[in-house]
Image (spheres, rainbow, N blue to C red):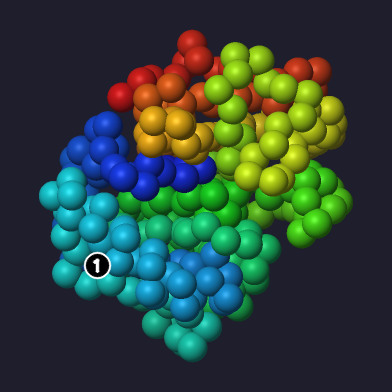
């Protein structure tokens, strides 16, 4: 069993830098991949864009799945559960983590995900859903308030996606594509709810992406970075780099 918590990927080489090789070592077979969209409103784009893109990303590293299954509310609970139980790879996709959570609850698939024995990857909203808490701080018109919610807690860790900065010290305010993350807000959450990780998918001017992600395998937590990717830890009094414990691949 392996779980990957990701913020996002290099769109030119999503599973490069050794990540695809890790998948190939762990895959038991390539019979099916199951995609769980980031909410019902993401389904059209998931079908038209994201699944074709990920099909190419996997193909580029030598992985081709025989079947691609998209979880939707049109499925019965049993269909959804069996799809996950029999999957070679399961991906919780990006979008709205609260809508994604509602979908998983309606289909009653949370236990299937938690007990899944293959490769489970969550990125952006999906990684937040796998966490102990979904952590949202006031950052935009869409998210004007704190919203902290207990979720699946697969590995007793929490992550906050898209903390994209090249700075060696976390800024007082971080503008991530129009969403403003305030350092003081993140620290206040850590003080009340425990430490959490800030992951990165930072697009550089040269077109490469600095990516960081966390892997949990049979109770062992490992942290990885691609290019100059960073993993930050929000503590009760600061936000610090976790560079000493992070492997570069």
Which quadrant is home to the C terminus? Answer: top left
| In-image side of 64 versus 10 (left or right) | left
Q: Secondary structure at mark 1?
A: strand
Q: Is residue 12 above or below residue 237?
A: below
Report whether 57 appears left or right of 163.
left
For mark 1, what is the residue?
A: 32
Q: In the image, residue 155 lies at what x, y percent?
A: 54, 41
Is residue 247 or residue 193 the one in the foreground?
A: 247
In the image, taking residue 107 as reference, residue 223 lies left or right, namely left
Q: Residue at x 38, y 74 (%)?
A: 48
Q: Residue at x 37, y 25 (%)?
A: 227
Please rate how many residues cluster around mark 1, counting C-alpha atoms within 10 Å: few if below 14, some from 14 to 19, many from 20: some
Residue 167, image x, y percentages: 60, 18
The residue at the point 51 percent across, 24 percent down is 230
Residue at 18% x, 55% y is 59
Q: Height in image: 37 above or below 134?
A: below
């Amino acid at each position: 069993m392996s779980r990957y918590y990701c913020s996002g990927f290099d769109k030119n080489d999503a599973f490069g830098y050794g990540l695809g090789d890790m998948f190939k070592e762990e895959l038991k077979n390539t019979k099916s991949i199951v995609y769980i969209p980031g909410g019902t409103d993401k389904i059209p784009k998931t079908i038209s864009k994201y699944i074709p893109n990920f099909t190419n990303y996997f193909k580029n590293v030598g992985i081709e799945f025989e079947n691609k299954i998209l979880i939707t509310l049109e499925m019965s609970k049993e269909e959804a559960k069996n799809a996950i139980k029999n999957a070679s790879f399961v991906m919780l996709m990006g979008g709205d983590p609260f809508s994604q959570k509602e979908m998983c609850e309606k289909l009653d698939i949370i236990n299937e995900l938690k007990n899944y024995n293959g490769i489970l990857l969550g990125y952006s909203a999906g990684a937040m859903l796998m966490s102990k808490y979904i952590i949202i701080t006031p950052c935009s018109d869409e998210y004007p308030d704190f919203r902290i919610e207990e979720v699946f807690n697969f590995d007793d860790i929490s992550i906050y996606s898209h903390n994209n900065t090249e700075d060696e010290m976390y800024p007082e305010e971080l503008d991530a594509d129009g969403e403003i993350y305030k350092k003081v807000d993140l620290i206040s959450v850590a003080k009340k709810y425990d430490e959490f990780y800030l992951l990165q998918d930072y697009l550089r001017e040269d077109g490469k992406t600095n990516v960081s992600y966390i892997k949990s395998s049979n109770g062992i937590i490992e942290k990885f970075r691609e290019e100059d990717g960073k993993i930050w830890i929000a503590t009760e009094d600061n936000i610090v780099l976790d560079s000493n414990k992070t492997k570069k691949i």
